[in-house]
Image: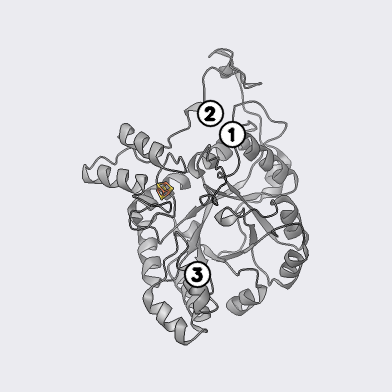
């Protein structure tokens, strides 16, 4: 098994070490060709050798026995054993609360930071937003550079909402990820969504030093215990609520679920890719162990043109029957979004994550 998984991680353009990303569709990679991870999963499944797949791989370099506990420098195996974890920071505990979101059926939404430095659109969006449990600050979707998340997170807090700070592995190395997380925590962020990230735009060099499974584990096991990723002591623990992403549209779904369950061993909540098909949602609900921790992605489509553009985004599946409906009636998008929300509640999911494309009015229409 280890050899098959090692080969898959070498072949994966995102250098993922723990299973397929959500962009896999019909076993194919968003970059073209066969998805190395879907392929590896199929081989193991066929050989009935999936036992042990749930182990998180790629952690070794963060747990070297040869590192000094206080400095993180390589000095010999005995020193690291001297470390006794500090008690958790009282402020951090107090700030964080006891559940990721207070509402039983939670509603989160998302904010697109500007492609530049103008903040008016963000402020207008937040001022018009109805009561929701949290607002994601998206991190450069599809590799397009947007304003980084700290200022938007502060704005979200100022407007009375919980900021959910998205952090992807695409454009930052381990050092930059930690620096961003330190700033986010100091700015009052307690909720983060950890993503491997979409692939990059042409001509841009990707990083992908780590993947979302490893990063989730590092944040929960190291930062929360007052350690940086190289085991050096921090000045205070960073005790985040950590969310992860999952894609109910991914095929093969089994491989996506196996990776999701691995991430949920350390994560606190999850948000899904947008779902446009109740059948897909029901199948997904049956396949996972913790629907109550999952917020289902809902994207209200405004018209046929938008549906057509979305249908070409890796990881999104829009059924043909819906495409036919929205061609004749642009109101079909809102109707489907409401249906998906009702179905999510019926199936026992923890809530919904609405993707409004910066139109706060749409959320009003959905949660009225
Ligand atoms: S679809 Fe995702 S996991 Fe599969 S090979 Fe491509 S980038 Fe890697």
> Which mark lies nearer to you, 2 or 3?
3
Q: Residue 324 shows which numbered tag? A: none
Badge 1 is on which residue? 222
Q: Residue 62 shows which numbered tag? A: 2
Left/right placement of residue 277 relative to residue 359 reads: left
Residue drawn 74% across the image and 58% down it: 157
Q: Looking at this view, name the residue that lies furthest to the bottom.
A: 328
- Whole-number angstrom distance, CA of label 2 to CA of label 3: 41 Å
Residue drawn 55% across the image and 12% down it: 76
Q: Which is nearer the eye, 103 or 5? A: 5
Q: Which is nearer the eye, 254 or 168? A: 168
Q: Position of residue 367 (x, y in %)?
A: 60, 76
The answer to which image quadrant residue 30 occupies is bottom left
Comes first in the chain, label 2 or label 1 = 2
Rendered position, 85 above or below 311: above
Considering the image in quadrants, where does the C terminus appear? bottom right
Residue drawn 76% across the image and 54% down it: 154
Considering the image in quadrants, where does the N terminus appear? top left
Badge 3 is on which residue? 309
């Amino acid at each position: 098994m280890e050899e098959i998984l090692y080969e898959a991680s070498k072949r994966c353009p995102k250098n993922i070490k723990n299973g397929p990303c959500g962009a896999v569709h019909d076993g194919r990679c968003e970059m073209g060709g066969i998805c190395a991870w879907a392929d590896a999963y199929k081989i193991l499944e066929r050989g009935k050798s999936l036992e042990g797949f749930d182990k998180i791989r790629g952690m070794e370099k963060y747990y070297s026995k040869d590192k000094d506990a206080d400095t993180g420098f390589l000095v010999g195996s005995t020193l690291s054993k001297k470390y006794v974890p500090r008690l958790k920071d009282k402020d951090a505990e107090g700030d964080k609360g006891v559940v990721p979101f207070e509402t039983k059926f939670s509603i989160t939404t998302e904010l697109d930071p500007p492609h530049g430095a103008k903040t008016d659109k963000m402020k207008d969006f937040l001022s018009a937003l109805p009561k929701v449990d949290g607002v994601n600050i998206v991190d450069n979707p599809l590799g397009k550079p947007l304003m980084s998340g700290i200022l938007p997170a502060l704005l979200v807090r100022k407007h009375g909402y919980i900021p959910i700070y998205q952090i992807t592995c695409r454009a930052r190395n381990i050092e930059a990820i930690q620096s961003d997380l330190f700033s986010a925590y100091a700015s009052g962020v307690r909720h983060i969504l950890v993503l491997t990230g979409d692939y990059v735009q042409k001509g841009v060099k990707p990083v992908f030093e780590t993947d979302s499974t490893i990063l989730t584990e590092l944040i929960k096991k190291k930062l929360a215990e007052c350690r940086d990723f190289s085991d050096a002591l921090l000045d205070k623990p960073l005790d985040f609520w950590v969310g992860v992403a999952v894609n109910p549209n991914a095929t093969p779904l089994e491989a996506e679920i196996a990776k999701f369950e691995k991430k949920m061993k350390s994560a606190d909540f999850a948000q899904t890719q947008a779902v446009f098909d109740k059948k897909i949602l029901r199948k997904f609900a049956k396949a996972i162990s913790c629907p109550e921790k999952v917020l289902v992605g809902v994207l209200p489509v405004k018209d046929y043109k938008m549906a057509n553009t979305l249908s070409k985004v890796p990881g999104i599946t829009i059924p043909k029957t819906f495409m036919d409906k929205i061609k004749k009636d642009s109101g079909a998008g809102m109707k489907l979004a409401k249906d998906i929300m009702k179905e999510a509640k019926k199936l026992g999911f923890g809530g919904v994550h609405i993707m409004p494309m910066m139109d706060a009015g749409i959320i009003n229409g959905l949660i009225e």
